[in-house]
Amino acid sequence: MPTRNFKRVYVWQLPVRIFHWLNALAIVVLSITGFLIANPPAIMSNAEAYDSFWFGTVRTIHFISAYVFFGVMILRVYWAFVGNKFENWRAFLPVGKRGIHNFLHVLKHDVFLLPEKNPKLADISIGHNSVAAWSYIVMFLLALVMVCTGFGLYADNATWWLPKMFSWVPSVFGGDFGTRLAHHISMWFILLFIIIHVYLVLYHDWLDGRGETSAMISGYKFVRTERIEAENFDLDMGVDENFVDMEDQSKKK
């Protein structure tokens, strides 16, 4: 088996990794509690209402998780202006000839799994590839819909100014029913995105062996040395000087 030289590249900084896992936890909790709120189970009980106020607890957990979700989104937008080149907002807009080429390349070989005889160095993405970048923009827009519709539904019962700022949202969707429907459908699209996201991360970890999964814990990815040199990296960008010899995982079938 041929070997290739790799270097460790510090791609994801600590704040982005924290945002990622907080966001993942918030989405899981919001999905579970949201399902319960949308379809509350009918539980027959002779106990006092005071001792059976579990649905109020479900709503409280949902609201707290929503604030975490909203807060993480605001912080991630801030970090898009102060983070490194892989986390910067420009990385989420892969326009131009190179961005379009990478988008088509990822569709052909990552999504449709067409064979690739001679992969080019320029097609090796260090941060997000072009398809992922555009999908995160869609994900951000869905998150905005979730936040606006969620706070819009909560506005009438809210006791402080933040949710009340969204009291206009139900009128946009034709009332609470349309707002709730948009909230519910957006959740399903987010869950669909998560399934595809997890599958592709694990798939590339198996195919490329570049540490896609562990990178969101350690921050480091393994990148071919030639790719780093072509990008004109330096040590200030977080490139580890030590070479790492790894078996070419792309040859494994």
Image: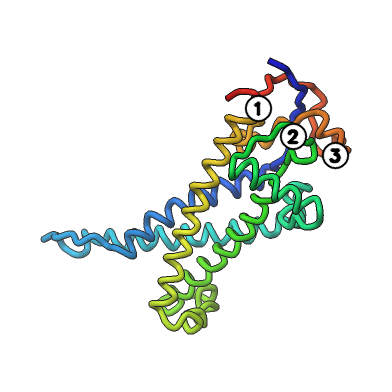
Residue flagged by tag 1: what amino acid is it? Ser
Give the quadrant of the C terminus: top right
Residue 51 has which mark?
Answer: none
Looking at marks 1 and 3 on the same chain, the residue that comes earlier in the sequence is marked by 3
User: At numbered mark 2, what does the secondary structure look like: helix, strand or loop?
Assistant: loop
* Labels 3 & 2 near each other (Cβ < 8 A): no
User: Vertically, is 216 above or below 209?
Assistant: below
Q: Quadrant of residue 225?
A: top right
Q: Position of residue 1 (x, y in %)?
A: 68, 15
Q: Which residue is mark 2?
A: 119
User: Vertically, is 13 above or below 29?
Assistant: above
Q: Which residue is mark 3?
A: 231
User: Vertically, is 152 above or below 237?
Assistant: below
10 Å neighbourhood of mark 2: few (<14), some, or many (≥20)? few
Q: Nearer the viewer, residue 143 or 247?
A: 247
* Labels 2 & 1 near each other (Cβ < 8 A): yes
What residue lies at 73% left-to-right and 18% top-to-bottom? 3
Q: CA distance from mark 3 to mark 2?
A: 16 Å
User: Residue extending furthest left?
Assistant: 46
Looking at marks 2 and 1 on the same chain, the residue that comes earlier in the sequence is marked by 2
User: At numbered mark 3, what does the secondary structure look like: helix, strand or loop?
Assistant: loop
What residue lies at 79% left-to-right and 36% top-to-bottom? 121
What residue lies at 44% left-to-right and 51% top-to-bottom? 28
Residue flagged by tag 3: what amino acid is it? Glu
Q: Which residue is mark 1?
A: 250
10 Å neighbourhood of mark 1: few (<14), some, or many (≥20)? few
Q: CA distance from mark 1 to mark 3?
A: 22 Å
What residue lies at 45% left-to-right and 68% top-to-bottom? 183
